[in-house]
Amino acid sequence: MNENKTFCEECRKDVEYLTEVAELKGKLKGAEYKYIGKRAICTECGSEVYVAEIEDENLKALYDAYYKEK
Ligand SMILES: [Zn+2]
């Protein structure tokens, strides 16, 4: 059962998406941190799509990376 749907700007419609684990980089307080996060990929065209919940998870992972460095 896959109810994961979001708007894909390439397809110009709501599509299902897959998530994959990815090494991402983010900036926090002027420094760049690498962290393990997730990417959402449109199942129809393979483009990366924006998913609010995944952005939230990635932000948490970025903060974890930030606090580990401290
Ligand atoms: Zn698409």
Image (cartoon, rainbow, N blue to C red):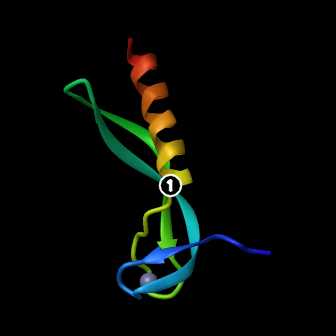
Q: Is residue 14 left or right of residue 69?
A: right
Residue 56, position in %: x, y?
A: 51, 44
39 vs 15: above or below: above
**Mark 1, secondary structure of its residue:** helix
Q: Residue at x 55, y 82 (%)?
A: 15
Q: Is residue 20 left or right of residue 26?
A: right
Instruction: Work out which residue is located at the far top of the displayed protein and give it.
Output: 70
Residue holding disc 1: 52
Q: Residue at x 71, y 73 (%)?
A: 3
User: Which quarter of the picture shows residue 12?
Assistant: bottom left
User: Which quarter of the picture shows residue 49?
Assistant: bottom left
Q: Residue at x 80, y 75 (%)?
A: 1
Label 1 crowd (10 A; few <14 / some 14-19 / many >=20): few
Looking at the image, how many numbered discs can be counted on the residues? 1
Q: Is residue 47 left or right of residue 54?
A: left
Q: Is residue 40 left or right of residue 48?
A: right
Residue 40, position in %: x, y?
A: 50, 65
Residue 58, position in %: x, y?
A: 48, 44
Image quadrant in which the C terminus is located: top left
Instruction: Work out which residue is located at the far left of the displayed protein and give it.
Output: 30
Which image quarter has ligand 1? bottom left
Q: Residue at x 50, y 61 (%)?
A: 51
Residue 53, position in %: x, y?
A: 56, 52
Inspect the image, locate mark 1, and give the three-letter code of the amino acid beneath it. Ala
